[in-house]
Image (cartoon, rainbow, N blue to C red):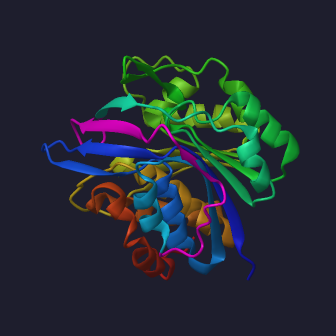
Amino acid sequence: MNTFKIAIIGTINLDIIISKKGEQTESLGGILYNVLSLSKVGKDLIEVFPVTYIGFDSKQEFLNLIKQHPNISTNGVVENKKGTNINFLEYSTDNERMETTDFVTDEIDYSMIKPFLSSDVLLFNFISGYDVSLKTIKKVRKNSNSIIFLDVHSLVLKTNKKRRSFCKVKNWQEWIKNINIIQMNIKELQYFTNRTWVKKPDDGEVKETIQMLLNKRLNIVLITSGEKGVYLGYRNKVYFFEQKYRSVVKDTTGCGDIFSSSFLAKYLISNDPFISCKYANLVAGMSTKEAGIKKCANLGVRSQHLTLKIQR
């Protein structure tokens, strides 16, 4: 079987994570969750190309993390002389957190992405919120036949005096004209699509919004819902996959990234979004048992075990 190439475009942070119990974990994060989890889950079938900056102060730690992964290329990684973005994440519950940031890296421009336009997938994951401009996305779409996957994430976050808060995306319809697959959680869905829900939306409201996105000609819509599971919008229908993996949650940082990586790896191999969704749901659920980037360490063993169990 041929290998698949996935380029991951976004920012790497130094995360300082404070759990709801007050426990502190410090580790590199951002798209590194995608990079390492894709390497682990994809094994010999996936080649991973991060397109990003790495601060001079974190470069050696980054290289140490990926040196045991021969399917990860550093050809798209540019050293940043200013240093590494710092992101404080303080959790009040398993899924709710306050973020305070100090971003020093530049926007990723078209010239950095251009060498990877022939990849099977271009995964854009918004970590800082300004990772890539809409203008760049449009240029990429014009010049590439790749599957373009957008993880909305921090595209709906703005920074005011280093404190991050949610904001609406005024030109969201322009973004989705240029992509094939979109992923976000329910709160991100609200702000991305400019919904005006007064309280937490019910199942019907979420499905209605997903249907609206499908009507905009998106191929696949993935809406994660924490410990409850994930919604899949596909071929004009909306499905829900319950999270069946239960464990004590230590840290949910990066779980959405692990979900997207697991989904893509399985989808490229199977071309079946249903199997891919079930698989990614369980892999992401398992990853909550560890804090920080360490949660990627055992994904290869766990995901291989799951492959034998999951059927459509």
Residue 76 falls within the magenta-colored stretch: yes
Residue 311 falls within the magenta-colored stretch: no
- Picture residue at 61% right of the left edge, 33% below the top: 107
Q: Quadrant of the C terminus?
A: bottom right
| Residue 219, position as x, y percentages in the image | 72, 47
Q: Is residue 309 visible?
A: no
Establish if 170 lies above or below 4.
above
| Residue 135, position as x, y percentages in the image | 75, 29
Q: Which residues are magenta?
A: 68-96
Residue toward you, 301 or 205: 301
| Residue 274, position as x, y percentages in the image | 59, 62
| Residue 200, position as x, y percentages in the image | 37, 27
Q: Quadrant of the N terminus?
A: bottom right
Establish if 194 lies above or below 233.
above
Q: Main secondary structure of the magenta part?
A: loop
Circle count: 0
Q: Is residue 75 visible?
A: yes
